[in-house]
Structures are given as C-alpha cells and as structure tokens.
Image: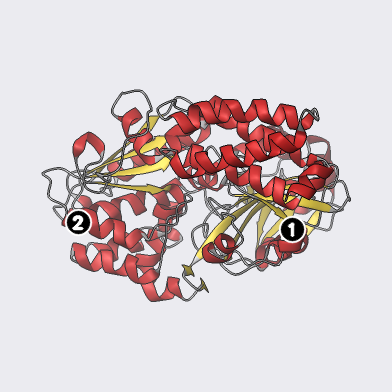
Amino acid sequence: MSIKVFVPNDSSALSLGAEKTAKVLIAEAAKRGVDINLVRNGSRGLFWLEPLVEVETPKGRVAYGPVTPKDVEGLFDADFLNGGKHALGLGLTEEIEYLKKQERLTNARVGITDPVSLDDYLAHDGYKGLTNALKLAPAEIVKQVTDSGLRGRGGAAFPTGIKWNTVLNAQGGHKYIVCNADEGDSGTFSDRMIMEDDPFVLIEGMTIAGLAVGATKGYIYLRVEYPHAHKNLNVAIAAAEQAGYLGANICGSGKAFDLEVRLGAGAYVCGEETSLLESLEGKRGLVRFKPPLPAIQGLFGKPTVINNVISLASVPIILDKGGEYYKNFGMGRSRGTLPIQLAGNIKRPGLIEKAFGITLRELLYDYGGGSATGRPIKAVQVGGPLGSFVPESQFDTPLDYEAFAANWAVLGHGGVVVFDDTVNMATMARYAMEFCAIESCGKCTPCRIGSTRGVEVMDKIINNQDRAKNIALLRDLSDVMLNSSLCALGGMTPYPVLSALNHFPGDFGDLAAAEK
C-alpha cells in the first residue's frame, strides 16, 4: 500500500523550490523501492517553512520543513514516511501553533486537499452549501448571507447581503455575478491562495450567488500575473461542469449557472469595480461615474453582483452551517473571519485566518515572530499601497473595520506589510504618490494631475527645498485628492502620505514636526 506524501503546488511554495523537492522525493522513493503516492496540495500558508512536506500516518499528517532537495535522502534515512524524527520534523501538522490557533473557515481546505480534485473537495464538506441553497428560495439565501454579517473582503467592507438583495430585486432580463480576482495590493495573496489551492470553494460561492439573485452567468476577472490560478480555475470549472455542479441543470434542479475566467491586462485601477466592468466589456479600464450602481446597471448595463474572491469563497460555509454560525465569529459590525496576509520585514510571513478582533501586535509577534532583521518594527502598512502607515502606538488596535476607521486607517484586503526602524517614511510617502501617478486611469484631474504634482512636492520636501511651504502644499493637495477624486485610487493616496507625515514627522525634517 502506497504512503501519501504531500508537497505543495502553490506558487509561493514553487518559488521556494517545491517542484525540485517533489522530483527528488519521487526519484529517491523509486531508488529505494518505496511506493509513495505524491499529492500536490496547496500551501498551508507557513511560507517560512516552504517547501513543507507532509506524510500521512495513522496519527495524522506529520510535517517536515523547509525541505530542500539535499534534505530528502536524510529524511528517508530517518524513516520520515512513518513519522520518524528528523531535524526538520515539525510534528503533527494540525498541532503546529501557527495553524492550531487559527479559525480557518474560508480556508478550511487550503493545504489539505488536492486543489483540482472534485472528489477531495466533496470528501471535505464541499458543495454542502450549494446543496442547502438549492432547497431555499432566492430571498432565503440572501437572508442567510445578510444574517451572517458578511461584508466585502475586497476593501470597501460593504454588507454583502444588502448588495445581493439589491440585485435580487432589480429589474433586468439578465443578471451577472462578477468575481473581482484582480488582486493587486502589495503584500496580499489570500485571493491567489484560494484560487490556486481551493478553486472549487470560489466556484461554489459564485454558483450560490447566482441562485440567490437570479443570475445565470458568472465571470472571474483574474489578474494576468496569476497563471497557476488561471490553470486551476479552468480545470476545476471543467470538473464542476462534468459533474453537474455548473451548467444548464445544476444538480438536476433545473436551474442554470455558467462560469468562465477572463484575464485582466495588469492595470491596478481595474481592481475598482466599475473600471473592471469596462475592461470585462472589452473597453479601456476607466472608472465609471456612480450612480447608477453596478447592482442596478453593471455588466452590459444589467444588474450585477461584484464581490471579491474571499467574499464569495466565504459563502459556502455560511450556507452549509447557517448565517448565525458565521456571525458568532468576530466583533462589533465585523463578523466572521479575515484571511490576514503577513509580508515585508517579518520573520514568519504567511497567511493567518482569524476572527475579527485580533490585534496587530498579536499578529506581528505571536504569529510573525517580529521583524526578520531583529530590529524594532517601526510601522506597518495595512490595506495595500494606499493604506495608512500604522505606528507602534496603534499596534494594540483590534482588526475591526470601525476600529481602524477611528484611527484614520483602513483594513482593506487584510494585507499587512512590515517595516523595521531603518525605513524612511518620507520615501514611502513619495512612493504612494508615484504609484498613484503610474496607475491612474487619467479620467479625473485630482488623481491624474494631483499625484504627478505630489511626486514633485515630495521630492522638494526630501531635498529640503522650502520644506515648510511644501509640507503645507502637500497637505492641501492631499485634501483635494481625498475629497474630489472619482474613485478610491486618487481618494486614498492621501492615506499613506498623511499618516506618514502625521506619525513620523521626524522623517520629513523638524519643520514637519513643528508644522503638525
């Protein structure tokens, strides 16, 4: 009987050598006449331990990592196929503290199953949510999602149930479900991990959304830089169609839902929902004026649900276990869990799924282990390149949409990028302005011109040219962009700029401190 060995096929693991490790494992097993069944699972999200190799034993899966090709021979010598002791041994995977202390709802199968095996998905509670949804009226499905307290996980945090209810009640011969998979924020990878490591959960979530609002067609708008996700999504969609979970007669219900993947072309602004719709229609990715909202006039002018990957991937467990079950996680108006992505100057980068309420300090030290350099952490940027820089004095802020807003910060997509005390925050503020200038769609003047002028002003401040005058000008310019930009790209660029200026005035010179 062959022994199951798991080596991740996730792109993060691949970038760290998982493919080479897998090939050497197969070769060594053949050399020793050992029969192994190598399963290419997803990553558990413990990136500092990749490539992570797991072995199925009677006691559970035992982990070893990080395993490089040169370690493989020694693992076989140590009888790792039977859970033998080795310097890289981590014990039972489920007992690893980093994993054990998480609440994995959306990512329940990530790292456990073969991502493109429908049988694996079904064996781990897959399609239970859809089975329940098929027994409910559309309004009852929407009510479950509303009762769960699920809010958009893409950044805006708009209540998902309200959006779905609007589309359900909108007039229109055709309706659409669009998944915003154009994950472009720095330090974010939770969408990618779902699409690479558990694509069926996204497919199931979108199918349930279609049933809920009366849509029969869905599109996944995927960023072109995710080839592994593209491949796995298409394989999973084909498998779901073959098994009757997609198509003209879902599970014999007489209800239809079709799904396809469309690739974006690398424009950051297409992460904004109306710009995404323009691109999906084959046009240049320009932001639309609102109203009308996409829920009323979206794709091809029809009522459209647009949700982020994590929002839609959270739907199956809500329909499986009920809205109240999901709502029991979290705090305040932030219900359920959030996949948090730790990146930057951090000792243990990776994915952590926790209920809302955990603090930044717990994330940075209990999970992240402090900075990779061992130096003090000076700031973290939460919510992507347009998120505020959070100083150490605010590290005890709980991860909660309202708590972050009270500090003039954003939780966004849950990306946390860490900087130690060697960072210069004036340089980081300049980067935010430059990023906006490069990525602006150009439709509105505050974003297009404001960001260009912002880079010029930042250069003058950094070079100590009329610093007091230019700091005042920077604040005035930020106010204009904040209050008059057409979309969040120009409207949020002031967040990192002003937070850097307010919390780290010393990096802008003594005049910045005096001016504040």
The image quadrant of residue 258 is top left
The residue pinned by badge 1 equals: 364
Which of the pair 9/47 is nearer the observer? 47
Q: Is residue 432 above or below residue 130?
A: above
Residue drawn at x 53%, y 50% is 413
Q: Specify the amino acid type for callout 1.
A: Leu
Q: Is residue 414 above or below residue 512?
A: below
Label 1: element kind: helix
Disc tally is 2
Contact? badges 2 and 1 (CB < 8 Å) = no
Quick check: can you spot residue 197?
A: yes
Q: Is residue 445 above or below residue 319?
A: above
What colour scheme governs how the chains and residues are painted in the rendered image of this protein?
secondary structure
Residue 402 is left or right of residue 298, and the answer is right
The disc label shown at residue 76, or none = none
Residue 70 is left or right of residue 260, and the answer is right
Residue 439 position within the rendered picture, expressed as x and y whole percent measured from the top left: 52, 28
Residue 294 position within the rendered picture, expressed as x and y whole percent measured from the top left: 27, 44
Q: Specify the amino acid type for callout 2.
A: Leu
Residue 377 position within the rendered picture, expressed as x and y whole percent measured from the top left: 81, 53
Which of the pair 426/193 is nearer the observer? 426
Residue drawn at x 49%, y 27% is 448
Residue 185 is left or right of residue 21, and the answer is left
The residue pinned by badge 2 equals: 168
Label 2: element kind: helix
Of the residues under marks 2 and 1, which one precedes in the sequence? 2
Give how far apart the Cα atoms at labels 2 and 1 are: 41 Å
Residue 353 position within the rendered picture, expressed as x and y whole percent measured from the top left: 58, 60
Residue 86 is left or right of residue 340, and the answer is right
Which of the pair 498/283 is nearer the observer? 498
Residue drawn at x 18%, y 47% is 256
Quick check: can you spot residue 386?
A: no
